[in-house]
Image (tube, helix red, strand yellow):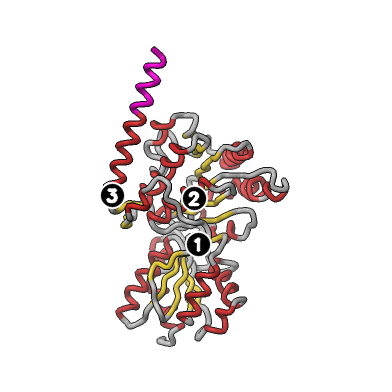
Amino acid sequence: MLALVGMRGALRAAGRLGESRRALSSKTTMTVRDALNSAIDDEMARDGDVFILGEEVAQYQGAYKITKGLWEKYGDKRVIDTPITEAGFAGIAIGAAFHKLRPICEFMTFNFSMQAIDHILNSAGKMYYMSGGQFKVPIVFRGPNGAAAGVAAQHSQCFAAWFGHCPGLKVVAPYSAEDARGLLKAAIRDDNPVVFLENEMLYGMEFPISADVLDKDFMLPIGKAKIEREGTDVTIVSYSRGVHKALEAAEELAAQGVSCEVINLRTIRPLDRGTIVKSIMKTNRVVTVEEGWPQSGIGAEIGAVVYESEAFDYLDAPLERVTGADVPMPYAENLETLALPQKSNIISAVQRVCYRK
């Protein structure tokens, strides 16, 4: 009888998985939320060592519904609700990774990851080096990063530069549904700790996708940028939500006769220096876009890449940075808008490097 019940359960699960596959295969567009959900589902189905834990990931199906349907499919042992204790469940996840499991540790927001920063940097990020290669740490830390809307100073920070500073970590910041699905699957299969920085404002955004993206083994290489739009007059470099703003600005600038090349970094560490340098040697101008603060930011690092490479000799204008304002995030809506990079800021920066303003 127990065997029959177990068989029925397995058949129901297989049926649900088949329905999910058929639904995916008919899609020509996908939201970032669905891309992340399907990537986790694929990898949990593929590898029994993959599990996810975090606040409200199971019965509530995730604060942003990224884990929707996973608890029903995989049960309590692989989709685990935790108490509100980031240091505690991050430590548990890293310990599991030491023992060859592949945990996905969800932070409800990366602002809360600061509670677990010692574990992330010292336990996960340094263990492979400190053990002489004896301990791999195959773990993904994921969740929304950067500003959302109306959540003020303590819930609006971008941690790309923070984590990107640290050797031992890989740091990924997807923009599109293709990015989210391909990079998350690659991160889960990676034997190194990966910090996966999503953006709440992108979760509901829909993107066109090809049939290849829906393949269960589709992955994107960590450490390789993508040229989202080719151009000849100026290079705009960004990541995550900043790519969307950059593409909007490029469209408007095209009407003014300025051809913008837009680079989606996809990965913060390792940084794809080659793609950046090659583009700048073609366009002779560069503008960087990020939501984080200016000091020691991603734009500053890209500036160093330019000045320390052959691209410097090709510049026809100094590099321009478009960043978040150097203040804690205001709560008031009008001030929040002023504190974040807008399309108009990018257009002005491009006009300056092109000596149009």
Residue range highlighted in magenta: 1-12
Q: Position of residue 266 (x, y in %)?
A: 47, 60
Residue 259, label in figure: none
Label count reads: 3
The earlier-in-sequence mark between 1 and 3 is: 3
SS state under label 3: loop
SS state under label 1: loop
Of 245 and 125, nearer the camera is 125
Query: What residue is shown at x 36% (from left), y 53% (from top)?
Result: 212
Amino acid type of the residue that numbered disc 2 sits on in the rendered structure: Ala
- Label 1, label 3: how far apart the Cα atoms are: 26 Å
Q: Which residue is mark 3?
A: 27
In magenta stretch: residue 23? no
The earlier-in-sequence mark between 2 and 1 is: 2
Quadrant in which the C terminus is drawn: bottom left
Q: Is residue 51 above or below residue 238?
A: above
Of 261 and 300, nearer the camera is 261
Q: Which residue is mark 2?
A: 186
- Label 2, label 1: how far apart the Cα atoms are: 12 Å
Amino acid type of the residue that numbered disc 1 sits on in the rendered structure: Lys
Query: What residue is shown at x 43% (from left), y 52% (from top)?
Result: 182
- Mark 2 surroundings within 10 Å by alpha-carbon count, few (fewer than 14), some (14 through 19), many (20 or more): many
Q: In which quarter of the view is residue 308 placed? A: bottom right
Main secondary structure along the magenta-highlighted residues: helix
The earlier-in-sequence mark between 3 and 2 is: 3
Q: Which residue is mark 1?
A: 224
Q: Is residue 115 above or below residue 257?
A: above
In the picture, measured across the screen, residue 261 lies left or right of residue 111, that is left
Contact between marks 1 and 3 (CB within 8 A): the answer is no
Q: Is residue 143 above or below residue 98?
A: below
In the picture, measured across the screen, residue 170 lies left or right of residue 175, that is right
